[in-house]
Image (cartoon, rainbow, N blue to C red):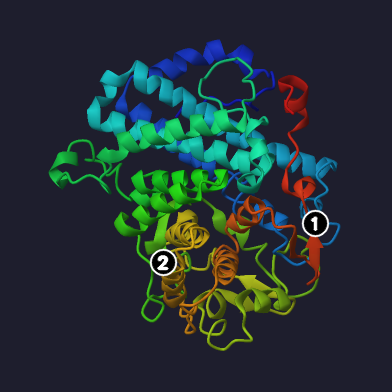
């Protein structure tokens, strides 16, 4: 397949000089439906890169930022990131790699999107709606996480930020350096893309009421199977809930999240019957995931707390951190929770998260990393209900998830708003260890004191929460 890469949103590079020579190849690629399919799959493969969701933006950098893992020695590759030392040569390179990787993939998405319009006749109506709908969702997904990393959070309590500059939102494939727009303008562009995506993906087999025969011709090769591994209708809708919540629009976010809970194909597990020990990502709850070729080679050497201290890059938790997170002193809360008793493994030096550990290549979820899951929609809706003083609804949603995890003790029906929001906090912490979302929860709420790597409490603010733009973006793109 032909994928055209760029190195950033604002820098000038050799690819600009090569674009004209690559253009013919791109034109040829999109002359067939197979070319469009290759481009779409290529975009998903882009997500699996180590600097993106195959490692750094799922279980590595973003989780290091939230101080989950035990303290890394100074020799470790990502020690600077864990210590918020963003200006060191190594940390700056790691941050730049994630930025460039995201905008590389966005460039490929934008090229494919432009060609869906230019060569729409090649696609036919069903292929056009599904492929374009997925691409639009991917464009928002990548931009939104760049915003969550490189811009300030806690917008709900800081409305003045809406007039400040956000990350560049790139919608065209060309040589122009894209200007930064305000948060408000950038959110408008995201929501426009999401609404168009949802409109197109009403054709999605997971949402449409069309019969299987309707898709027989376009899906002869099974291209539209396994929709949970693609940016399907409900994944896009869940992304909309995230975007709305990040803005502080709790009511709208909660409404969207509740619709997903009610209507999506995903279902919470029953811990009494579900084989959590072999299905560690809880596949039936996944709204969107990626398949990472060779994940075992990246993750297994790092998720280890055995032997001596020679493995400087090992990622594990302290026992105190795990016990406090899962409330193991309460035998009706921590001990029966499958996220603790099945997904956490105590080894010689600490506790390892087995959620993504690869030990059976025949397992159904081998190589798979979840990026959006159904429990998050329960938490988004519960937080929205709680902040609207609809506490009964919030408690019901939280208890539903807790029960599915095996927790015996229920949140009492007379819990206060403060108590319910604390339980939302606890659930995010328990659920998203090893998945990157805990950092975003902390940042979205502007939480100033968080558990530290030495079983202590540390104080952080925008200086730690906001990653710096790469140097080439500042130099060539005038980012601020």
Question: Which quadrant would the C terminus be assigned to in this image?
Answer: top right
Residue at left offset 37%, top offset 63%: 284
Which sits in the foreground, 179 or 269?
A: 179
Image side of residue 6 versus residue 71, left or right: left
Image location (x, y in percent) of residue 43: 47, 36
Q: Is residue 197 above or below residue 77?
A: above
- Of 306 and 120, nearer the camera is 120
Q: Quadrant of residue 29?
A: top left
Q: CA distance from mark 1 to mark 2?
A: 45 Å
User: Can you say whether 230 is above or below 317 in the image?
Assistant: above
Q: Position of residue 138 (x, y in %)?
A: 47, 37
Q: Is residue 328 left or right of residue 243?
A: right
Q: Is residue 166 something one can see in this rendering?
A: no
Q: Which residue is mark 2?
A: 393
Residue denoted by label 1: 76
Count the marks: how many? 2
The N terminus is located in which quarter? top left
Find numbered disc 2 in the image and state the secondary structure of the residue it sits on: helix
- Assign a secondary structure to mark 1: loop
Disc 1 to disc 2: CB gap under 8 Å: no
Name the outermost residue toward the bottom.
Answer: 331
Q: Nearer the viewer, mark 1 or mark 2?
A: 2
> From this viewpoint, is residue 408 visible?
yes
Q: Residues within 10 Å of mark 1 (few under 14, many from 20)?
A: some
The image quadrant of residue 393 is bottom left
Q: Give the mark nearer the N terminus: 1 vs 2.
A: 1
Query: At which x and y percent is residue 261?
Result: 36, 59
Compare residues 66 and 231 and report the one nearer the observer. Answer: 66
Q: Quadrant of residue 474?
A: top right
Residue at 84% x, 41% y is: 87
């Amino acid at each position: 397949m032909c994928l055209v890469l760029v190195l950033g949103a604002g820098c000038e590079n050799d690819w600009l000089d090569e674009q004209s020579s690559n253009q013919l190849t791109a034109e040829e690629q999109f002359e067939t439906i197979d070319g469009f399919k290759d481009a779409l799959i290529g975009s998903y493969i882009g997500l699996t890169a180590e600097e993106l969701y195959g490692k750094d933006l799922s279980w590595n950098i973003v989780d290091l930022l939230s101080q989950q893992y035990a303290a890394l020695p100074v020799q470790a590759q990502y020690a600077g990131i864990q210590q918020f030392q963003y200006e060191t040569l190594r940390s700056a390179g790691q941050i730049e790699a994630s930025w460039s990787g995201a905008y590389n993939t966005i460039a490929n998405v934008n090229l494919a999107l432009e060609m869906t319009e230019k060569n729409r006749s090649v696609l036919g109506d069903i292929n056009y709606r599904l492929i374009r709908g997925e691409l639009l969702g991917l464009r928002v997904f990548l931009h939104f996480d760049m915003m969550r990393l490189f811009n300030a959070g806690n917008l709900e309590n800081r409305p003045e930020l809406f007039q400040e500059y956000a990350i560049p939102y790139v919608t065209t494939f060309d040589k122009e350096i894209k200007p930064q727009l305000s948060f408000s303008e950038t959110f408008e562009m995201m929501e426009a893309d999401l609404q168009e995506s949802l409109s197109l993906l009403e054709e999605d087999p997971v949402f449409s009421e069309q019969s299987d025969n309707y898709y027989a011709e376009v899906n002869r090769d099974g291209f539209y199977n396994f929709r949970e591994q693609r940016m399907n209708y409900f994944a896009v809708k869940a992304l909309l809930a995230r975007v709305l919540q990040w803005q502080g629009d709790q009511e709208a976010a909660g409404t969207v999240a509740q619709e997903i809970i009610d209507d999506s194909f995903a279902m919470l597990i029953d811990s009494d019957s579900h084989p959590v020990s072999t299905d560690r990502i809880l596949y039936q709850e996944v709204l969107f995931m990626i398949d990472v070729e060779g994940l075992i080679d990246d993750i297994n050497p790092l998720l280890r707390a055995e032997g001596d201290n020679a493995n400087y890059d090992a990622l594990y938790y302290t026992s105190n951190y795990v016990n406090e997170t899962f409330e193991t002193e309460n035998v009706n809360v921590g001990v029966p929770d499958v996220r603790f008793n099945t997904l956490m493994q105590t080894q010689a030096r600490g506790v390892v998260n087995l959620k993504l550990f690869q030990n059976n290549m025949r397992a159904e979820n081998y190589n798979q990393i979840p990026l959006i899951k159904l429990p998050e929609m329960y938490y988004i809706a519960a937080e929205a209900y709680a902040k609207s003083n609809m506490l009964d609804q919030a408690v019901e949603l939280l208890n539903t998830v807790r029960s599915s995890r095996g927790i015996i003790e229920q949140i009492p029906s007379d819990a206060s708003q403060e108590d319910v929001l604390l339980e939302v906090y606890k659930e995010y912490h328990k659920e998203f260890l090893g998945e990157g979302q805990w950092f975003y929860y902390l940042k979205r709420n502007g939480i100033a004191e968080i558990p530290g790597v030495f079983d202590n409490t540390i104080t952080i603010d925008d200086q730690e929460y906001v990653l710096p733009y790469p140097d080439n973006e500042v130099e060539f793109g005038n980012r601020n």
